Amino acid sequence: MNTKYRIGLSFFLLVALFLSAFTSTPAPLPQSDNADPPEQIVKLVFIHHSTGENWLTDGYGNLGRTLGENNYFVSDTNYGWGPEAIGDRTDIPNWVEWFASENTPTYTSALFNENGQHSSYTRALSDPGGENEIIMFKSCFPNSELAGSPTDAAGTYEELSVAGAKYVYNEILKYFATRPDKLFVVITAPPLSDGTYAANARAFNTWLLNDWLRENGYALNNVAVFDFYNILTSPDAHHRYNGGVEYIAAGSNTLHYPSGDDHPSAQGSQKATEEFIPLLNVFYHRWKAGAPTQPPPAEIPSAQSESAPEASAPSSPALVSLLDDFESDARLWEPFSGETADTTMKCSAQTGPTRSGSRALLIEYSIAPAGWGTCAHFPESIQDWGASKGLTFYVHAAQAGVVFDIDLYAGSRDAQETYLYTVNAPTECASGYAPVTILWSDFTRASWEDNAGAIFDKPNQIVGIAFGIGSSDVLNAGSFWVDDLSLTDSSAPAPEATQPAQESESAPQEQKARPPFSCAGALLPLSLLVGLMFWRKR
């Protein structure tokens, strides 16, 4: 056998073995949904009015009792509930006030901690403590009277129309993205007996079920929709788990189960309970498979890896001077954003989860593609921070994968220079506050300015400081908390150098080591990727 033939035969045999390895091993089967009740007691709160009350009530819809039988500890809200009696307002346009307004932190704090009953249902389980994990909310049947046309796109303000309702749900989704530790379950409004607006109601609820999350590029699994509307339109209409999630529309768009008016009857409500409970179990298990731990209501020290040797843990930075604890409005932080449609930036000192004291800086953002936003503070006079070696602050990222910049503005008012450092908050920071320490030598000149990439050397000429958010190819929405911003003289030993995606060629080698981002030992600094995408202004 000649050499060329032997080589060719050997190659053929190798290829055959390689292909057989793939064809003989079956691909793993997708994991099926789990419709079993949770193994542990799960706290749930339901926002509703009269239709929801009937649905919960023993002997009518039996929802409250049946949820308890499935290991859910149920609480609810009704008329007159909560701060500023927000429980009175549950129409579709009101969800903006609940979940997308300046009062959202107040309302949701009360909602997450609600453990009372405002309807009549059996609650045999004991309160397991902690916050409500599942948030169900529903508008009543008048909200099926939506003006406009079935094909209307989302509008620009909230109202009872197809366009206005789509706007509302798009807006509140931005808040849901900041709370992956909660499962939000949308219950569609029940149908009307009058068919005038029935086509609009059907079109909107179908959009909510099939297109809402997809159109927003929403990748989290903490939002689910139950089509209460569809179930009540016909005995043959279903939204249930039947070996898989099954949805059947039977051709009717009006209420099939009246009770003398448009409140669904006991029969219709019990049908909804029968179909909803297994589906809720599916939603819960899907969410729980990737749910982060619950953000703490108070200070939690940064986690220390139990397996890491004690000597390898970096020492705490020595604080030189507290710049802002956000307990007062003496230092004004202002939001700025690019003139891009659908971009919003909010920041203010708020009560909520804090590292110390009663307030922290809450930064909420929704940045459209090609947009940018900053939360900035400009002191009345130029600051001299030269006696320190850098900055330390504490961050609690409510959403995994939050990326933000720390911007320094230096020089003079008339010749302001921008330097920045980009931080990628790891998943572990959703469980509590973690310290971030950045040395002056880690800030580099913004790419859009002269001498781009130069190392920061003007800590004695500080004009301002900001937290900045950039854009991506899709809407970038989220929030995070900052507390105890301080100057620091870091005594921590430098960790091993971690090279960012782009390193300044002019930076000396000894300056390329990054300070610790202490979040269970994680260190994830980035280059100026976000800074390349937008510019900042006062």
Image (tube, rainbow, N blue to C red):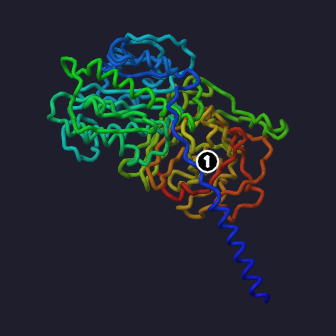
> Whole-percent x and y of residue 465?
56, 44
Task: Classify residue 214 as left or right of residue 127.
Answer: left
- Find the residue positioned furthest to the front: 1
At x 55%, y 52%, the residue is 412
Task: Classify residue 349 as left or right of residue 459.
Answer: left
**Which residue is denoted by mark 1 in the rendering?**
423
Q: Look at the image and tell me whether residue 327 can be seen.
A: no
Q: How many marks?
A: 1
Residue closest to the eye, 165 or 519: 165
Task: Classify residue 47 as left or right of residue 19.
Answer: left
Q: Is residue 464 above or below residue 510?
A: above
Task: Classify residue 16 as left or right of residue 138.
Answer: right
At x 23%, y 34%, the residue is 160
> Whole-percent x and y of residue 79?
32, 15
Residue closest to the eye, 29 or 261: 29
Local secondary structure at mark 1: strand
> Whole-percent x and y of residue 518?
70, 39
At x 79%, y 37%, the residue is 315
Residue 320: quadrant of the picture:
top right
Label 1 neighbourhood size at 10 Å, few (<14), some (14-19), many (20+)? many
